[in-house]
Amino acid sequence: MKKIVFILCCLFSFKTIAQDLQISHLRCEYRLNPLGVQTNTPNLSWQIQSSQRNVLQSAYQILVADSPEALAKNQGNVWNSGKILSDNSIQVKYEGKYLLATKTYFWKVKIWDNHQHTTAWSKVNSWQMGLLSKADWKGANWITYEKLADTLVNTLPTDGKKDKVQGNNILPIFRKSFKTSKTVKKATMFIAGLGHFEMSLNGKKVGDHFLDAGWTKYDKQAQYVTFDLTKQIQKGDNVVGVMLGNGFYYIPPVKERYRKLKVTFGYPKMICRLALEYSDGSKATILSDNSWKMSPSPITFSSIYGGENYNANLEQKGWDTPTFNDQSWKPAMIVDGDIELVAQTQDPIKVFDNFSAKSINKLTYGNWVYDLGQNASGIIQLKVKGKMGDTVRVIPAELLKADGSTNQKASGSPYYFEYILKGDGIETWQPRFSYYGFRYLEVKGAVPQGEENSLNKATLLDLKGLHIRNAAETAGDFSSSNELFNKTKELIDWGIKSNMVSVFTDCPHREKLGWLEELHLMGSSVRYNYQAQNLFKKGIQDMKYSQTAEGLIPEIAPEYVKFEWGGDMFRDSPEWGSSGIIVPWYLYEWYGEKRELEESYPMMKRYVDYMITKGKNNILSQGLGDWYDLGPKPPGVSQLTPMGVTGTAIFYYDLTIMEKIANILGKKEDAKQFKTLSSEVKNAFNKTFFNPETKQYATGSQTANAMAVYMKLVEPEYKEVVIENLIQEIKGRNNSLTAGDIGYRYVLRVLEDAGRSDVIFDMNNRSDVPGYGYQLAKGATALTESWQALPTVSNNHFMLGHLMEWFYGGVLGIKQPEHSQAFKQIEIKPQVVGDLTFAKGYYDSPFGKIQSEWKKNANTFELEVSIPVNTSAKIYLPSKANDSIKELIANKNIKPLKVENGKSIVAIGSGNYHFMVEN
C-alpha cells in the first residue's frame, strides 16, 4: 500500500511569526511607482509575505497623501480608507479626493491577518498623475517639419490600391533652450511623437526606451510618454532635443524598399509639456510651439517595413546641448492634431539580449554573412572605421539561400540598414526607428577586422544583433527532465518575445500587424511567462478604436489596412474579432480585472449585434477558419474543418461569456437575452454539424471535435464519446497533430481536462512529424509560422505556441478552478505522463509566487509546492482510496477531501509544503 507523507517545512514561535508578516510588491495599475497614471480611480494592490501557514488577510488600511512628510506622520490627507474588513489585496479601487493632473501621490498600506497579527506600515510607494484632459496640455501645440496635404492622408488604405504620395520624407530634429534659475524640486516631461520619438536632455538620451510611444489607431488616438527629468535638469541653461521617426504613422512610398502597406496618417510630428516645480513652490511650463527650432536629421530614410539609412556626415555635433548655435535652424511649424492623447501604460520596448556572431563566412561576390545563432526581433549595432563616404549596408534575414547569402523572400524584401561613415575614427551606430526579425546579417561595403581588405573598404570592428521587445517583467519559468520540452519552451518563448512590442504582432518582419486571434488563443501562454497585463489592456483599446460603425472588430488592431484578397476573408473572422469579448474576460479571470469588463461592455455588445447580422440560421461561415491547419495543400485557409465550425463555436463561446459578464455587471435583461441566443446557436450548431450516428462533428477533424467539447456545445450524454473520437483520430494518425491556429489550443485543453495528457505527450514528444520537435530538427530557433517550418513563410511567428500553456497548467499543474479570479483559489494538479521524471517551475500570480516541483522514481513521487499568502489551494496527489496522508512532524492523519481518477485531493492554505508518495 502507498503511503503519502506530508512534510512540515518549518515551525516558528508565535513572536517570530508575528514579526514575519510583511507587505511587499505594492502596485498602482499593475506598475511600480508609475508615471502618467491616466485614471482618477487607480487600482492598488499588494502582496503579503509570511513563513507561517494558512495566512489570510482579514482587513486592510490604505493611506494616501500629497507629500512624503504627511505620510510619515500617518496622515492620509488625500485618502484614509480606515480599517476595511476585507481579504481583498488586489484591484482595490482608490476612493479618496479628486486627483490632480501631473501631481504625485504617496501611499502605504497595512493589513491584519486571520491569526490576529498586524503588519507594520509598508514601504512608501507613489504614483504620478498624467494629463487627463486636453486642457491639461496647457495649450501645447503639435509641431512638425513639413505638413502632408490633407488630400494625401490615407489612414486606412486598401491593399493593392495605387499610392497617393511618392518619395521620401525629411525626418526632423527639434531643440528647445530654456533656463532654470531656481532649484528644481520636480521636472516631468509629457511627450508624444508620431510615429516615434527619441528625446535627449543636454546631449544625453532620456531613458532606455526604443520606439516610443506605442503605435495606435493614429486618426483617433495616440500615446504620450512620461519621463521624470528632475535629476537631469541643470541650473542655468538646458536644451531638450527630440528626433522623430516614421513608424506606422507614415510609411514612405519608396520603390526600392519593402512595404507591406501604404498607410499615411501624416508626416511625423510631436507635442510636449515639461512641467517644472521649484523648491520655493513656484511652477513653470515649457510647451511645444513655434519657438522650438528644427532641422533635418542624419536619418535619411526610415520605414517600419523597409529599414533605416543614416548619414553620419549630416550630424550636427552638439545639436541638443546648450552651447550649440542654432541660428541657421528654422522655427517649428504648428499643425493640427485633434486626436485623443493617453498615457503609454504598457511597458516600453527596450533592448535586451545582444548576440555576437557564432560564425562569419565570405560570399563569392565579396559580402560577409554573420550567423548570430538566434532568430529574434531586433536591430543591429555596428562599430566601424573607414573613410568619409564609405557606405556599409547590413541586410538582415531569418534564412539563407543556397549560396549562403541572406534570404528575405518570406520576410519582406528589400529591407536593410545603411550607414555612411564620416571618417572620424571609430564610429558606432544602431538604428532608432525600425526593426526586423533575423538570425543572419549580410554585410556589404565593409570587411571584418583581420580579414584581407585589398579594396580598402571600411573595417568592421564589431557587429551585433540587439534583441528588442516589450519590457514586461518575467512571470514564470518551466523546466523538466524532457530536453525536447525544454527546447520547445525556449522555441515558443522566442516567438512570444519577438512579437511582444507595443502590440502583439504576428511576426517581426513581413507584417508586424496585430492579428487578434493570437490575443485570446496565446494569451494564457503569455501570461504564465510575462506580466503583460497592461499590454493586453492596450490591445483592448486598439480594438475599441478599430471597431467599425457597424460593430465589426476587424482581424487586425490597430487596423492599418483593408486586405481585399478573398473579399472580407482577412477582415471579418469571428475567431479573430472575438478577442474583443474573450480578452477582457480572461483579464477578469487572471487578474480580477472587473473595470475592463465595465469599460469594454459597449464594444462587446456591439460586436455581438454585428455577428447576429452575419449569421445564416445562426451559423457564421465567414473568415479564415482553422488557419494553417495541416492538410494536403500548402497551409492557409482551413482545409480539414469546414467553414462555419470554428466561427460558430467561437460565437457560442462569446455568448456564454457575455451572459456571465452581464450578470457580473448587474445587467440581468441582457444576460437573459444572451442565454436565449446562445441556446439557439447551440441548437443550430448541433443540427448543422453533429452526426448522431458517428458522434462526430463535421468532418471529425481534431479541431471540430475539440472545439465542440471545449465550448460545451456537445450534449452531456455525448461528451465522452466525442472526446474518445478525438483521441482515436489522433492515434489513427500515429499520434500526430493536424489542428491549426484556431483549433490546436482547444485540442490541448480538452485532452488535459479529460485527464489525457498522455496523448498530448505522445503528440509532442517527437521530431519526425510536423510540430515543435520537427521545427527544432529543421534548425528553427524561434516558433515558426507553419507546423512544417516551411522556408516559404515566416520563421519567427507567434500563433502556434499553445503547448506553453500545458507546460504550466498541465505538467506543473498550476491552474485555478473555474469560479476563481486571479488565482485566489489554486489547483496544483501535475500531469505525470510519458517518460517525465521531474518538472519544476513557478507562476507569479497577483497574490504572489506559486511554485510546483515534482520528481518521481521507481518507488516514490514527491511534490513540493508554495502557495501565496491570502490564497488557498487543492493539491491532487496520485494515490488510492485507502492510502493514508500524514503530517510527519505532528504525526496527524489528514483525510483527503475525496479521491477521484486515481488522485487524492488535499485542501491546504498558504505556505510551503512537501508531499511524498511511497510505494
Image (cartoon, rainbow, N blue to C red):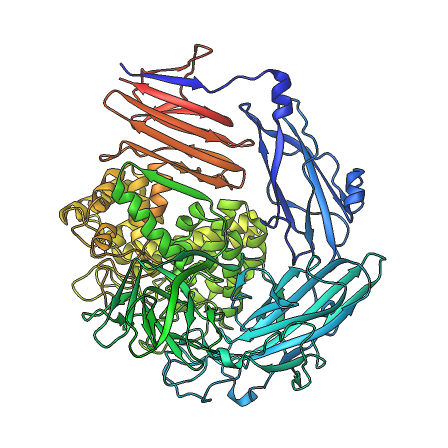
Residue 524: % across, % down: 41, 48
| Residue 649 or residue 39, whichever sits in front | 39
| In the displayed structure image, the side of residue 401 where residue 456 appears, left or right | right
Q: Quadrant of the N terminus?
A: top left
| In the displayed structure image, the side of residue 359 where residue 19 appears, left or right | right
User: Residue 681, can we see it?
Assistant: no
Judge whether 660 appears above or below 162 on screen.
above
Residue 8: % across, % down: 46, 18
Residue at 74% across, 74% down:
139
| In the displayed structure image, the side of residue 226 where residue 166 appears, left or right | left
Q: Quadrant of residue 275?
A: bottom right
User: Residue 161, can we see it?
Assistant: yes
- How many numbered marks does the figure carry? 0
| Residue 173 or residue 637, whichever sits in front | 173
Residue 60: % across, % down: 68, 34
Q: Quadrant of residue 283?
A: bottom right
| Residue 659 or residue 672, whichever sits in front | 659
| Residue 110 or residue 723, whichever sits in front | 110
Residue at 47% across, 89% down:
165
Judge whether 746 appears above or below 917 on screen.
below
| In the displayed structure image, the side of residue 495 where residue 61 appears, left or right | right
Judge whether 605 appears above or below 854 on screen.
below
Residue 769: % across, % down: 17, 52
Q: Quadrant of the C terminus?
A: top left
